[in-house]
């Protein structure tokens, strides 16, 4: 099965960058581990996007294992749209309506 194109929303890019920089200030090793886990998770989503359930908003979620983040995404016929890489302590649903 081939991977779908992945489109990362600006808000999700910002989530990733801000979180990476936060970890970088504390530990370069932790920052690299965070980056690696996010990239691996997005690759997993691209390969099998329908493996995760659809929520009430029509999005899907993959929870990272080592870091308190969830990747929120939607699947269209041609692409996977990464909407947020949401920290578990942030206001839930802050990304809704920003597509």
Image: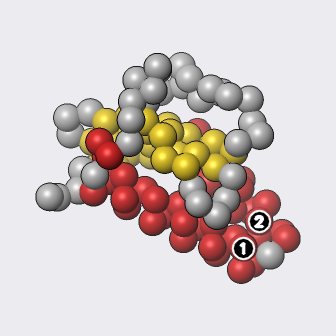
**Image position, residue 2 (x, y; %):** 17, 58
Please tell me which residue is depicted at 59% across the width and 67% down the height of the picture. Answer: 35
Q: How is the image coloured?
A: secondary structure
5 lies above or below 60: below
Q: Is residue 34 above or below residue 99?
A: below
Relative image position of residue 16 (x, y in whole percent): 62, 54
* Residue that lies at the very extreme toward the bottom in this rendered image: 29
**Can see residue 14?**
no
Q: How many marks?
A: 2
Task: Tell me the residue at 54%/19% (across/down).
Answer: 97
Whether residue 69 is visible: yes
Give me the disc on residue 30. 1
Q: Quadrant of residue 28 in the image?
A: bottom right
Q: Which mark is residue 11?
A: none
Image quarter of residue 34 = bottom right
Name the residue nearer the viewer: 55 or 2.
55
Which element type, helix, strand or loop, lies under badge 2? helix
Position of residue 27 in the picture relative to residue 63 (left or right)? right
Helix, strand or loop for disc 1: helix
Whichever of labels 2 and 1 marks the residue nearer the N terminus, that label is 2
Residue that badge 2 annotates: 23
Verify CB contact (< 8 Å) between mark 2 and mark 1: yes
Are there few (<14), some (14-19), or many (20+) residues within 10 Å of tag 1? some
């Amino acid at each position: 099965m081939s991977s779908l194109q992945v489109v990362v929303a600006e808000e999700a890019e910002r989530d990733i960058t801000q979180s990476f920089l936060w970890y970088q200030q504390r530990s370069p090793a932790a920052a690299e581990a965070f980056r690696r886990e996010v990239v691996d998770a997005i690759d997993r989503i691209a390969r099998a996007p329908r493996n995760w359930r659809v929520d009430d908003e029509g999005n899907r979620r993959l929870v990272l294992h080592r870091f308190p983040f969830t990747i929120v995404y939607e699947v269209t016929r041609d692409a996977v749209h990464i909407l947020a890489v949401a920290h578990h302590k942030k206001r839930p649903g802050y990304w809704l309506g920003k597509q």
